[in-house]
Amino acid sequence: MSASDEHDCKVALNTRANVLHGFTGYHLRCAWQVVQADLMHVLKSLDLRLATYSTLLLIAETPDQRQSTLADTLGIERPNFVAIVEELERRGLITRTRDLDDRRAYCLNATSEGLALADQAVKACQAHEEKLFGQLSAEDRAQLDRILRQFRTFESGR
Amino acid sequence: MSASDEHDCKVALNTRANVLHGFTGYHLRCAWQVVQADLMHVLKSLDLRLATYSTLLLIAETPDQRQSTLADTLGIERPNFVAIVEELERRGLITRTRDLDDRRAYCLNATSEGLALADQAVKACQAHEEKLFGQLSAEDRAQLDRILRQFRTFESGR
DNA sequence: TATTGTTATACTCTATAACTATA
DNA sequence: TATAGTTATAGAGTATAACAATA
């Protein structure tokens, strides 16, 4: 068996007490790393990465969008998005058809295989969330979700 | 003025509603990205990165530790830690002296310049935390900190 | 034999400039 | 001239194998 089959649960920045522990941002990072490590493991079983997963989901639910619109939504630079879209197309999960009104652009759509995989991935990620966030009390879990959503409106500027 | 002088507040994975918004993990990631972007900007003004910052802080408060111990604590692979330590030493922020009991190892210690910079960095990061997490209510901020700390004990394995 | 620090290397993710074809 | 998609490239961050010096 390969190293990729072992589930590596190690958290960077771990165990020993130090001044970093006084920062909420540090704990936020540690929490994300725990979640990310498990999420990546779950997605790997479907041969997906974070980027291909979120791209496939977005294409599956918003048909006929352009690459640049999708890339923008996902916060991925257009040049870096090309390889992601190419992989999904090569695997038969999405189609790219020329926009008839603007022949520079593509319209991206999920195939039935893509929709099926997106569905599988969502179910797997819901199970992953249950496994991880289910370790919190129901109240804490709801509070965490509610509080984290507030960050979307935050400015990080001076 | 260079691009590094502008404060880029953009959050990846942004604005448009999609199925990802149903996942707490997604919001956790977004929150970390908001915090990380601002933190990196703050540290850049002291010519520090996340890695050099956390390494300097750890060395400053735990004298006479070995590289491998420190790397382990920070969750950084030993080979990748070499360049970080070299940079801090080159800038006169830390010293590396051979361990007399084990001449394979180094003992790392912060210089007075290193201690001063660590102090500056901690103060800057405390201000950064006030600015960001201060946008939450006092109750929400305390709840978030408390809940996030629970993740340190979580297993992400099956 | 095992460990400390190191080198070399490779793979991912990210960021920018410049090209092409269309508009 | 501006935009959509692309190419090339460069920089971080991260991971592993293997080496020299020392234990």
Image (cartoon, coloured by chain):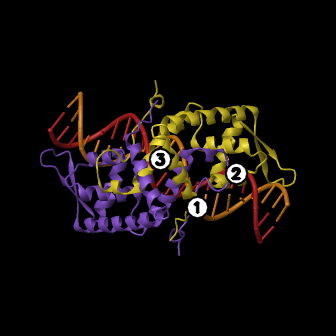
Chain colours: A purple, B yellow, C red, D orange
The mark that comes first in sequence, 3 or 1, is 3
The front one of C23 and C14 is: C14
Residue B76 position, x and y percent, is 62, 53
The mark that comes first in sequence, 1 or 2, is 2
Q: Nearer the viewer, mark 3 or mark 2?
A: 3
Task: Give the alpha-carbon distance from disc 3 to disc 2, as whole Å.
Answer: 24 Å
Report which quarter residue B97 is drawn in. top right
Subunit ID for the residue under disc 2:
B
Residue bearing the label numbered 2? B70
Answer whether labels 3 and 2 touch (C-beta < 8 Å): no
What mark, if any, has residue B32 been given in the picture? 3
**Crowdedness near tag 3: few (<14), some (14–19) or many (≥20) residues, C-alpha within 10 Å:** many
What mark, if any, has residue A5 been given in the picture? none
Please tell me which residue is depicted at 30% across the width and 56% down the height of the picture: B19
Secondary structure under badge 3?
helix
Would residue B92 be seen by someone viewing this image from the given angle?
Answer: no
The front one of B157 and A23 is: A23
Residue A19 position, x and y percent, is 66, 44
Inspect the image, locate mark 2, and give the three-letter code of the amino acid beneath it.
Answer: Leu
